[in-house]
Image: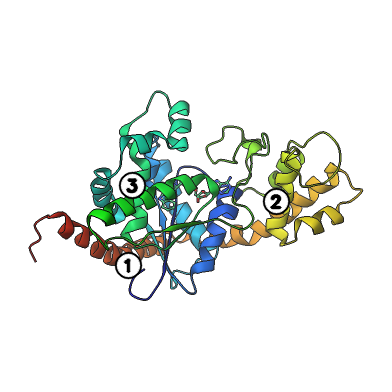
Amino acid sequence: MFGEQKVSFSGVQPSGNLTIGNYLGAIRNFKEYSEQYKTFYCVVDEHAITVRQVPADLRRRTYETLALYLACGLDPQKNTLYVQSMVHEHAELGWILNCFTMFGELSRMTQFKDKSARHADNINAGLFTYPVLMAADILLYQTDVVPVGIDQVQHVELCRDIANRFNQIYPDTFTIPTAMLAKNGKKIMSLADPEKKMSKSDENQNAVVYILDDRDTIIRKFKRAVTDSGSEIRFDPQKPGVSNLITIYSCFTGKSIEEIEREFEGKGYGDFKLAVGEVTADALADVQSRYREFLSDKAQLEAQMKRGAEEASYYARRTLSKVQKKLGFVQIH
Ligand code: TYM
């Protein structure tokens, strides 16, 4: 909360091509808050370097992620859109919060366990303290709500614990944030293995639909999606493949599960998969054409990065300075 205004904050890593999971679970919902909240949406490049990145790719994806924010309808007049590394307060508060986070807490983070298994040759300290930097992102802006997919909820819970711990020692420092999940789409699953989250770092290209996939690719990927035995189009935990496709169809059409089950009664998986592919391609077509426009104007994107960082810094500085003062750091004005 800044003054009377509630705050929404979230971030996306520029660590790969963004998927419909990122879109439906997070980015699409960022906009919901932009009318009534003060909103900050960040491209979190500092988080991305917890795994090795090719510098040119990281740079390119940072531009692309900002262009996608704009293409998804985030109006830069209503939302502060910026790049994390351009606002140095994130890293500074991150360090401070490291001193208020317990080793045991970080050891319990499931994403750390997953990622350290996948990158066994590079289990660096940044991978371990990743959620602390995320807490700093959120707390710098006195955030009330954090729109995220379900995989980030554990990190937001840790952020709340850190903020409460800090507030107990130094009262009234941070607003305590709440994770906000999309009603539909909080966990989009892989098309190849519906027990697994759809992830931008998946090596199997057929498991993932990217926001920027062309129409034919989208339809082909859905045609190949793993479904379950039987032939009924029914939402059922026993049928995770079909249920995931129903969720995606529902997200893109706004239809309820019951409506969808009725619409496809008596029809086979083939018809249904084609329909899911078509509505997805239709819905993404607009985003894709706007994206190409935004991406083609690099100077405009850079101007936005600069403006966004200046706006964000103003708020970040206020919180950081309050924290430093409470801790006993000397401040000379
Ligand atoms: P990242 O970059 O992995 O994902 C960005 C957002 O997309 C959501 N998401 C999904 N939602 C539904 N279904 C899926 N299959 C799916 N895959 C990804 C994620 O939950 C996320 O909301 N640590 C964060 C980035 C971050 C952040 C923050 C988020 C850094 N600081 C502060 C919120 C607040 C991450 O790696 O997201």
Closer-to-camera residue (148/11): 148
> Residue 194 falls in which quadrant of the image?
top right
Q: State whether residue 67 is above or below residue 246.
A: below
The quarter of the image holding the N terminus is: bottom left
Rendered residue at 39%/74% (across/down): 5
Image x and y of residue 262, in percent: 86, 56
Residue type, numbered disc 1:
Glu
Within-10-Å neighbours for mark 2: few <14, some 14–19, many 20+? many
Image x and y of residue 175, in percent: 35, 62
Mark 3 Cβ and ligand 1 under 8 Å apart = yes
Cα–Cα gap, marks 3 and 1:
20 Å
The quarter of the image holding the C terminus is: bottom left
- Secondary structure of the residue carrying numbered label 1: helix
Q: Which residue lies under the disc numbered 3?
A: 133
Rendered residue at 45%/43% (across/down): 15
Q: Which mark is first along the chain, 2 or 3?
A: 3
Q: State whether residue 289 is above or below residue 156.
A: below
